[in-house]
Image (tube, coloured by chain):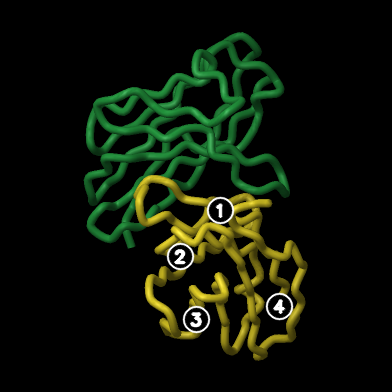
Chain colours: A green, B yellow
Amino acid sequence: GAVVSQHPSRVICKSGTSVKIECRSLDFQATTMFWYRQFPKKSLMLMATSNEGSKATYEQGVEKDKFLINHASLTLSTLTVTSAHPEDSSFYICSARNRATDTQYFGPGTRLTVL
Amino acid sequence: QKEVEQNSGPLSVPEGAIASLNCTYSDRGSQSFFWYRQYSGKSPELIMFIYSNGDKEDGRFTAQLNKASQYVSLLIRDSQPSDSATYLCAARRGDNFNKFYFGSGTKLNVKP
């Protein structure tokens, strides 16, 4: 299957700092990438849809100034959690849509802990 | 009403049995359907996708789609303890290729 990578896999940061998470599609071009967060034992929550070369579309209730998304190339999207707080601690997962197979593939996720 | 509904489970089956996971969707515009497996602490992994009514088999997995009844199912034959995970069903609209709806998942326990 298609490969999507995420970096870092785990990050611990102090409250007030910003954290950038990278999502890369390694073997296909992804015009669309998605960012999710997931709390323990809860379902995936879509945060935003990222389209290459344009602004991201955020889901209701997600602060776009808090979660900055950039999708500058067909293989890379980044999520920056600005001024992180303990309540931002979560499992953040990106996915990329492979247009050729019309399928969404997930990255391995980034576990963020804000102290 | 959620776009995609799944029973949260847990569904418990003995090793070697057939596990049957079900999913219903509300949007008749949905055209593509996906099953993902998610182990605890890991991200979802694609198992299968299905577009047409009927059955689609891949190894021990069979996806079934009935568009008239708006349900999708996943059968796992010869269930193994390693199949124990949460299974997510997803649907995608035909007129918006970027709009995927995920169910909340069904937890499967395969007992040795």
Residues marked 2 and 3, same chain = yes
Q: Is residue B36 above or below residue B102?
A: below
Q: Residue B102, labelled with which disc?
A: 1
Residue A75 place in picture, x, y as percent: 26, 38
Q: Residue B33, labelled with which disc?
A: 2
Q: Which residue is tagged 3?
A: B61
Q: Is residue A97 above or below residue B36?
A: above
Q: Looking at the image, is mark 2 or mark 3 nearer the viewer?
A: 2
Q: CA–CA distance between discs 4 and 1?
A: 23 Å
Q: CA–CA distance between discs 4 and 3?
A: 15 Å
Q: Earlier in the sequence, mark 4 or mark 3?
A: 3
Q: Earlier in the sequence, mark 4 or mark 2?
A: 2
Residue B33 place in picture, x, y as percent: 45, 65
Q: CB atoms at circles 3 and 1 under 8 Å apart?
A: no
At x 51%, y 78%, the residue is B66
At x 62%, y 84%, the residue is B79
At x 72%, y 72%, the residue is B109
Q: How many numbered circles does the render carry?
A: 4
Q: Is residue B53 above or below residue A106?
A: below
Amino acid identity at mark 4? Val
Q: Earlier in the sequence, mark 2 or mark 3?
A: 2
Q: Which residue is tagged 4?
A: B110
